[in-house]
Image: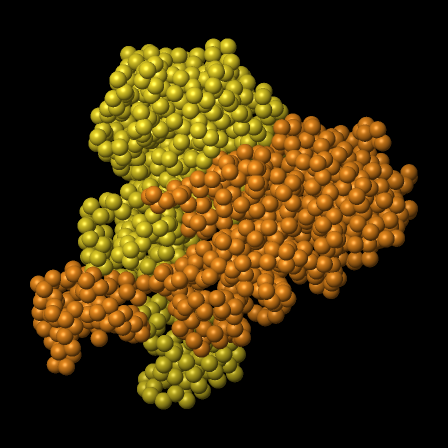
Chain colours: A yellow, B orange
Amino acid sequence: VPFLPLIYVAWADGELSTEELGAFRAAIHRQPGIDAASLAALDRWLDPELPLTAAELEDLLGRIHHHRDSYLRTGSGNGVGEVASALGMPYEDVVRELLGAVSDDAPSAAALRVDTSAMQQLLDGPEREARARMRTVLSQPSFRYRHDLGTEARRRQVSEWLQLLAREGFGARGLPVELGGGGDLPGFLAAFETLGTHDQSLTVKFGVQFGLFAGSIYMLGTERHHRWLREAASGDLPGCFAMSELEHGSNVRDLRTEARLDAATGEFVVHTPDVGARKEWIGNAAVDGRMATVFAQLYTGDTCHGVHALLVPLRDASGRLLPGVSVTDAGEKMGLNGVDNGSIAFDHVRVPREYLLNRHGDVAADGTYSSPIASPDARFFTMLGTLVGGRISVARFALSAAKSGQAIAVRYAARRRQFGPAGSAERRLIDYQSHQRRLMPALATTYACDFALKALTRRYLGFRNEAQREIEVQAAGLKAYVTWHVTDALQECRECCGGQGFLSANRIGVLKSDTDVYTTFEGDNTVLMQLVAKGLLTEYRQQFGSMRLGGMIRFLASQASRRIVASNPVAARKTDVAHLRDVEAQEFLLRYREVRMTASVARRLKRLLDKGEDPFDAFTRCQDHLLALARAHIERVVASAFRAGIADAPVTLRPILTDLADLHVLNGLDRDAAWFLSAGVMEGNKAKAIRNLVLQLSASIAPAAEGLVDAFGIPDAVLGAPIAAAGEHSHVLRG
Amino acid sequence: VPFLPLIYVAWADGELSTEELGAFRAAIHRQPGIDAASLAALDRWLDPELPLTAAELEDLLGRIHHHRDSYLRTGSGNGVGEVASALGMPYEDVVRELLGAVSDDAPSAAALRVDTSAMQQLLDGPEREARARMRTVLSQPSFRYRHDLGTEARRRQVSEWLQLLAREGFGARGLPVELGGGGDLPGFLAAFETLGTHDQSLTVKFGVQFGLFAGSIYMLGTERHHRWLREAASGDLPGCFAMSELEHGSNVRDLRTEARLDAATGEFVVHTPDVGARKEWIGNAAVDGRMATVFAQLYTGDTCHGVHALLVPLRDASGRLLPGVSVTDAGEKMGLNGVDNGSIAFDHVRVPREYLLNRHGDVAADGTYSSPIASPDARFFTMLGTLVGGRISVARFALSAAKSGQAIAVRYAARRRQFGPAGSAERRLIDYQSHQRRLMPALATTYACDFALKALTRRYLGFRNEAQREIEVQAAGLKAYVTWHVTDALQECRECCGGQGFLSANRIGVLKSDTDVYTTFEGDNTVLMQLVAKGLLTEYRQQFGSMRLGGMIRFLASQASRRIVASNPVAARKTDVAHLRDVEAQEFLLRYREVRMTASVARRLKRLLDKGEDPFDAFTRCQDHLLALARAHIERVVASAFRAGIADAPVTLRPILTDLADLHVLNGLDRDAAWFLSAGVMEGNKAKAIRNLVLQLSASIAPAAEGLVDAFGIPDAVLGAPIAAAGEHSHVLRG
């Protein structure tokens, strides 16, 4: 039996000489301890007169694979090593080569057709009317792109566009009817998301005005502030959200702008103590903003009550800055030049006491501070909780930008031809494996993110109070995961369109430059991912209490899905497509990684803390590990939301959605294959098989890709790119 | 012995109850076949009265690791599985947990100081005078950045800058003295590279004028064309390099612009047959270009001689387009808006027969075609060979852009503070593990690329003819590898600078947008990497002839370094720092991957071809594999060039350079750990140890990072970014 691999290799090449076979046989005969029957069989297999047929070889390979374990265990004892050396092949290499081989020539799955309109209906969801209205408005000639405008003109254009959207009622749609709104928050969010397929400056300006400014008045303020909502929602009162400072972006708790009560006059004095405390990157500040929600350390007397928000007028109705307010234009940026960012400094600016947004903390006329939330910590996080909606929206409109970019890149790839077999027409880019590999997994991930964000939005809208903490963590994690995905996906789109992708008219470059800052605004992604990891560790500690080593192993074992591996160690090396595409098997891997990473990082932290390390330092030393954990968690959440969405989808759409889900998940497993291999839940042949399946799924989805991007429902006028247009330009792109 | 892991776990947690220990003992006593001596020893180890000391535990873990193989092989036989289950821990998990553990608490290496000026001298190399002059010129006030200019003004500014550089003699520096040049090609290339730390539009325009236009006249033309060189090098004759067409970018061989001889008048008629054949993305075309090197299919009568280049005047001295020439402005781009790209169409434009750049192919007055290179294929590739210098230069100036971005990001990280332990000052960003992980490996790779590009440049300058083919392949591969690195590195820099990185004044965003197209111009990276893979396969076939399975295994075995694994299977799981940093061990892994990938992709191709698949299709089916191979090859080339450079460096610089080289190489191994794990040359614990070492090296290099970026020698004025400036702004960035 140990000689089988050598025999296979000898015949597989098909042209071993009689001499070589003879030498092989002689080497075998020199070995002691081989019984006569085995020798006879070996002689038969090495008979130059009777070469093995293809079927026999196939059979032989099957037997070798069947006895895989014994080959791996046995090593080159029994003289087989010597025989192999005589042939010039180390036995271990032969075994590794044969056992590691995975066929990549499996016929690829049949391409599936997409029912584009059914898919669009599914993606549009219950808010299809709001989306359709936004699409109609954006398709009007007034919203046509201009790529030749300077910064001043761009800003003017975006302000005008914003007014048009406000006039169509998009700004007020999400507010309660009794406050003059449309009472349709889901519709507001869906329209906002749809807007993200268009110009990003407009989208961000829309978010600043209606999401952050009006939203903070609504969420942090009370009745006495809500009178401003009508004007905010109509765009008549342009506003800012002034949280970040030059020296404190992520670390909001240590902001240094001050709001001190002057009890004598019943006013707050808002002041910027030094240049590092000026409000920075504030959208709408440089030109348009007339009022701002300002975050500051609230003081009564010498007592600081921590960060609170209050309204501060910036400019009068004619746009002149008010006394004590100074604004510096942020100037040119890498993108989003239609948004007038600026910094704001306050020099003892006085506002009435009632301008404090007092839902979570108030100051009475006599200077008494009160709050419905006793703990300052809890109060701080409750106020920041108002950012959750913003983070979900950033992720949603960022994803819309990726959809526009992918629609353009896929259409171009389906038309553009370059190179080809001698004497034939040139091939379409989308027919190349490398092109499929760059575009299809990312497209699948866009679909996955879309389902995950919709699921999160539903939870956010429905259960705001009960599961608030968990929703906050998921919003932080998804915002980071999605915006990083968008950056990567648009990068691939740009490169896949070559020089065309660099032209502003084709919009991919513009989308890329504009969205780049999304990974660091509304919460720096790295900071957000650490919030996610902290949340998981808290949960783990609650669920489990101790972080002892034995306890952790028991915890891992207690996970129901753990049994898949425990009871079936073969799973680690299964390579058949059915297994690789099995949802439960995929979920096991994703969950296993998350649980194990949670437990191991918890143990590391405990060890460091036990040694007396400062908690902050201990956490910093595990940052890389914590970020990997957060990513593992979010990947599982996204995959599971996608699967749940598919279960609810019309039956006809499920096959293509399942292809996309498999591609998305397998691509993620492939990217992190080193972890699974190291953890022992995947073997080399399985990792290879996953990679092959990613290629195969990319190839089988490619013919459906145009339908999949059409289902995003982006009107041609909104897409804008000449290279993505059917008709007039397509003749230019033929091969 | 099999119980040791359980005993370790039992005590490691330090608080096993007397009941639990009793249950454990009882379970052991229930097992048959344990001899009395072992039982007594086990009882001793589980005696609640005599807990194991820390030293004994340490010793126990050592023994477990020592018998690693037997634990992995044995599995949960001998009743140990049952005992483990009784404790609620699957035995396999216990073993995996203990054997997989890699200590990450090793003290990090002492930070090394950098002798900045010695390092700069090393990086500047023999061409330091040329670099110094370029730096002086670029530091003049006239080269100060303006971020508020519209496209027209930007283009004007860049044209003026170009004239200033030409006046300083940078354009002529590389040409032979007898043609009016400075006879200093290395100095020209070094100055060009140095220019890349400044504005990218200027750099590209410089490359178009002096590299591509003047370079093509010099390289493809003969004496009769060289009379134009003086004007080209002085900038008085602005020129274009018109190769790409709308429908044919990468596929140069199938260009469709025509140059037909009119024998009657002794002229070539240059014509664009349809819109798809117009020359596209041509730098200098939209505004400035007065002459172009045009690539066209050369016809005499009805015979096509393939692609040739000829000079075609575009505009007269006053800048008016000549009859038959039409130009369309490419319009706004994602970046490089200081370069006036445009498309050019020719309507039967006549130029004298002598305008054909006739070094490699000529047409006599009577219409006879002749060429010193008989094979049309060889002729085509020889002409394209003139692109090699351009590709090397793109890689070099792209890397300069990364250096500028990294200098800015590192300086900012060393000043900016955010968050910190309770009650202490906030921490500098550079002190965070995640920040180190993002910036340091990329900085190490920039150093590695710098050494590799200098080595390649030396070979290019010295041995142009002998090793031309290999140099072409390396230029293609390094151009792709470096420009992808630059894109990734600048992305990290941008994110690491948060909102500040988005401001144009801080330049990182500008550098990112400008350099983005480098991955797809001067050869699309994906296409270039396939050239590299093809080159390797050709070499493999030449070296080895057959692609038989047995042959391949022998080939692998014949690689000398192969013995490292063959004779020492322990290497796959060695985790000590000395081994991980051992140059030979690293080189073995890099070479092993390359050789094995070469062999396996060669076999796959052979199998597909044997089945009768079209070679083009077979190649396409292996694209992903081929790209991985090309990357593996280039990674090895870069690493080995870096090591060779270190050997030649001053002794005092070697320690820090060695840290950088290790970080660069180990980071690459970490990224591709899945491959090494699958191939069986790395085990899980080693993969983890490599990842830990990457973190440790990143941490130990971080304190030296400012010195390392200072050594790039970029003057403050050229760096430009306020966030990178010492002095006046730094107070703004404190915590």
Viewer can see residue B365: yes
In this rendering, is residue B135 above or below A6?
above
- Give me the residue at 39% from left, 87% from top: A31
Check the image and report above or below for A462 versus B733.
Answer: above
Do we see residue A132 in this rendering?
no
- Using the image, determine if residue B662 lies above or below residue B179: below
Q: How many marks?
A: 0
Q: Quadrant of residue B56?
A: bottom left
From the top left corner, tell me how far across and down residue B414 is, in percent. Answer: 50, 46
- Which part of the image, by quadrant, shows the N terminus of chain A? bottom left
Horizontal side of residue A360 vs A97, given as left or right: left
Q: Give whichever of A36, B616 is nearer the camera.
A: B616
**Residue drawn at (72%, 45%) of the image:** B136
Please identify the quarter of the rendering in which residue B24 is found: bottom left
Q: Nearer the viewer, residue A549 or B659?
A: B659
- Residue situated furthest top in the rendering: A318
The quarter in which the C terminus of chain A is drawn is top right
Q: Please state if A439 lies on the left or on the right of A586 as rendered.
A: right
Rendered location of residue A435, percent (x, y): 52, 45
Left or right: A629 with respect to B290? left
> Left or right of B353: which side holds B336?
left
Q: As displayed, is residue A213 above or below residue B387?
A: above
Q: Nearer the viewer, residue B228 or A47?
A: B228
Please name the residue shown 47% across and 42% down the image: B416
Q: Position of residue A107 (x, y in %)?
A: 43, 52
The location of residue A90, given as percent across then percent down, is 45, 76
Of A735 and B334, nearer the camera is B334
| Point 31% across, 54% down: residue | A613
